[in-house]
């Protein structure tokens, strides 16, 4: 942090205060921010600018989270649709094969080994 300007350190301190995992650390980060403002004579304008920057970064994180959430919903939706289509195709094949078995007297196709032909197949 030695190469950082007081304003940048203030932004980091405010970010730490906002993102602190507990109240004690938030208070420490707030005290650091207050000390920076006092010791370096950071103007009220810069303090407000730093606060807006921290808020903007938080909003960016919020929108990134929303975007990732929507992406996951889309992916799970596509995977779910694909799984559904596979199940439908398997059921159709099962029905075709058990019908063939019934029509050929067991010479071709599959027996109704699941015992669902009468319920599921048309």
Image: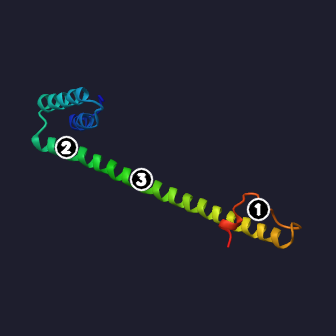
* Secondary element type, mark 2: helix
The residue nearer to you, when weighing 66 against 49, is: 66
Q: Which tag, 2 or 1, sits closer to the chain's start?
A: 2
- Residue at 15% across, 31% down: 34
Residue reaching furthest to the right:
107
The residue nearer to you, when weighing 3 against 76, is: 76
Asked whether, in this view, residue 95 is left or right of residue 9, the answer is right
Mark 2 lies on residue: 51
Q: Which tag, 2 or 3, sits closer to the chain's start?
A: 2
Q: Which tag, 3 or 1, sits closer to the chain's start?
A: 3
Near mark 3 (Cα within 10 A), the count class, few <14, some 14-19 or many ≥20, is: few
The answer for how far apart the CA atoms under marks 2 and 1 are is 70 Å
Q: Classify the position of the N terminus by image quarter.
A: top left
* Secondary element type, mark 3: helix
The residue nearer to you, when weighing 104 against 80, is: 104
Mark 1 lies on residue: 112
The disc at residue 84 is none
């Amino acid at each position: 942090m030695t190469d950082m300007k007081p304003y940048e350190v203030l932004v980091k301190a405010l970010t730490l205060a906002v993102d602190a995992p507990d109240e004690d650390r938030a208070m420490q980060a707030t005290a650091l921010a207050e000390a920076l403002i006092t010791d370096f004579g950071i103007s009220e304008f810069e303090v407000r600018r730093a606060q807006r920057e921290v808020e903007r970064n938080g909003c960016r994180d919020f929108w990134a989270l929303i975007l990732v959430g929507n992406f996951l919903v889309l992916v799970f939706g596509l995977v779910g649709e694909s799984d559904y289509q596979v199940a439908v195709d398997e059921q159709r094949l099962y029905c075709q094969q058990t019908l063939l078995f019934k029509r050929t007297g067991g010479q071709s196709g599959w027996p109704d080994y699941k015992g669902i032909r009468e319920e599921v197949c048309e």
